[in-house]
Image (cartoon, helix red, strand yellow):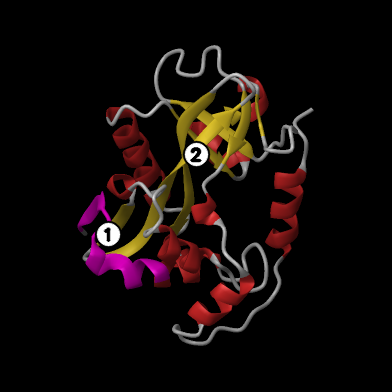
Amino acid sequence: MTLIIRTEDNKDYRQVEEVAREAFWNLYFPGCHEHYVVHKMRSHPDFIKELATVIELDGNIIGAMFYTHAKIKDKEQEVSVIAFGPVFIHPNYHRQGYGRKMIEASIKKAREMGYRAILTLGYPYHYETYGFKGGKHYNISMPDGLYYKGLLVLPLYKDALKGIKGKIYFSEALEVTEEEVEAYDKTFYHKEKGFQESQIEFENTVSLLDE
């Protein structure tokens, strides 16, 4: 078995999007849009190509993760940080440690590249093991000024966020319309849309305030 974690190459694009579609289909809502987000974000100025990471098992891509530039703003300052997402592993390879290997490798590279901090949205129990803490711990809120449990922050060096507070603004590269997604999804093989209990769990998690 040969496992390789490397930077995404142009030739990987379609295979990566197919894996993303499999990973997210009917997970958070009927269908998914992550495969189109990945497709669209690659041409956005905020996309960080050097941190676009794929994990390959015996020559087949089984997962990937992507980073974009983001900003923490308040009335006094604007600080550049980075954010990751989408991040995914093909469902056939869940719970086998591949996601952890990929995430750890990408965090290490981001640290070596000198970035200040990584932010993401997700389940706290997925990312606390890597050192992420809730935004409230660092006085970083969502744009509405509220602190949600799903907003997670990882400084990449000592005192990286000392004296910094404000609202996080993620890249517009992550924003897509339903019409765009529907049109692009037609270039893939047909999959039935459905509903899962995990959709309710995700909505509840990201909407919970960090009291």
Give percent across and percent down for residue 112: 27, 29
Residue 104 screen position, x and y as percent: 37, 38
The circle on residue 22 is none
Q: Which residue is mark 2?
A: 70
Q: Residue at x 69, y 36 (%)?
A: 149
Asked if disc 2 and disc 1 are in contact, CB closer than 8 Å, the reply is no
Quarter location, residue 103: top left
Residue shown at the point (79%, 27%) measured from the top left: 211
> Is 117 or 202 nearer to us in this picture?
117
Considering depth in this image, is 201 or 109 the residue closer to the camera? 109
Residue 8 in the image: above or below residue 16: above
Residue 205: in magenta span:
no
In the figure, is residue 33 to the left or right of 156?
right
Identify the element where label 1 is drawn: strand
Q: Nearer the viewer, mark 2 or mark 1?
A: 2
Q: Is residue 20 left or right of residue 113?
A: right
Residue 24 shows in the view: yes
Whole-number angstrom distance, CA of label 2 to CA of label 1: 28 Å
On the image, the x and y values in percent for residue 122 come to 60, 45
Amino acid type of the residue tagged 1 in the rendering: Glu
Q: Earlier in the sequence, mark 2 or mark 1?
A: 1
For the image, the number of numbered tags is: 2
**Residue 132 visible from this viewpoint:** no
Q: Which residues are magenta?
A: 2-17
Q: Position of residue 48 (x, y in %)?
A: 35, 46
Q: Nearer the viewer, residue 157 or 1?
A: 157
Q: Which residue position holds label 1?
A: 56
Q: Is residue 191 left or right of residue 115?
A: right
Helix, strand or loop under label 2: strand
